């Protein structure tokens, strides 16, 4: 009880099954950080599976480069929020990479071009003076 009041999401009492522990950890990951759970993500008829590294739009495959794949995965798991170029660099490329912020624009353009045939390119919105947003609804 004290653990939950202190901020824990869940707890397991002894004795416990390792399968139950793993299931509870996965459930917490799905709730707190879906992008870390490694499970498929769907927005409308756009589906991304990180395990198979495939993207489907209405059942049709979409070919993406590795950076565009990571960028789309981040957007799909963080929809509706606006991210600056610097934030996207940190989240998608990692904070250990030192590249120009305008590199984000190039990869956004490539991602939009890949999604254009399915009509999902419109989900990636430019928020003038701020950054980019992925429209999930």
Image (tube, grey):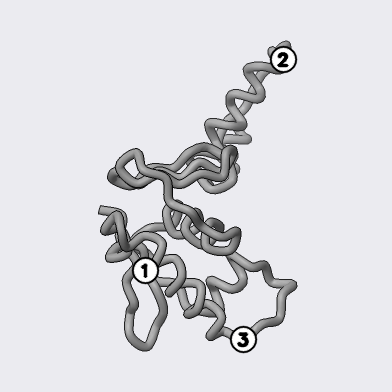
Pair 3/1: label in front: 3
Tell me which residue sits at (41%, 79%) in the image. Answer: 131
Quarter where residue 60 is shown: top left
Decide which of tag 2 and tag 3 comes sooner along the chain: 2
Rounded to the nearest angstrom, the CA distance separating label 3 from label 1 is 20 Å
Q: Is residue 44 visible?
A: yes
Q: Is residue 116 above or below residue 102?
A: above
Q: Position of residue 43 (x, y in %)?
A: 33, 47
Q: Which residue is mark 1?
A: 133
Q: Position of residue 9 (x, y in %)?
A: 55, 37
Q: Is residue 21 left or right of residue 46?
A: right
Decide which of tag 2 and tag 1 comes sooner along the chain: 2
Rounded to the nearest angstrom, the CA distance separating label 2 from label 3 is 51 Å
Q: Position of residue 6 (x, y in %)?
A: 60, 43
Q: Position of residue 37 (x, y in %)?
A: 57, 40
Q: Is residue 83 above or below residue 63?
A: below
Foreground: 20 or 2? 20
Q: Is residue 50 left or right of residue 14?
A: left
Decide which of tag 3 and tag 1 comes sooner along the chain: 3
Foreground: 63 or 78? 63
Q: Which residue is mark 2?
A: 14
Q: Which residue is mark 3?
A: 100
Q: Is residue 20 above or below residue 25?
A: above
Q: Is residue 128 left or right of residue 102?
A: left
């Amino acid at each position: 009880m004290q653990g939950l009041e202190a901020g824990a999401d869940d707890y397991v009492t002894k004795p416990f099954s390792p399968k139950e522990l793993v299931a509870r950890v996965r459930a917490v990951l799905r709730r707190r950080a879906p992008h870390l759970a490694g499970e498929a993500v769907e927005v409308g008829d756009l589906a991304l599976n990180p395990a198979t590294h495939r993207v489907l739009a209405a059942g049709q495959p979409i070919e993406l480069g590795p950076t565009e794949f990571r960028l789309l995965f981040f957007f799909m798991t963080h929809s509706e929020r606006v991210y600056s170029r610097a934030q996207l660099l940190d989240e998608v490329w990692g904070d250990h990479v030192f590249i120009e912020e305008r590199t984000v624009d190039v990869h956004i353009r490539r991602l939009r071009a890949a999604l254009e045939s399915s009509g999902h390119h419109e989900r990636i919105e430019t928020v003038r003076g701020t950054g980019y947003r992925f429209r999930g609804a």
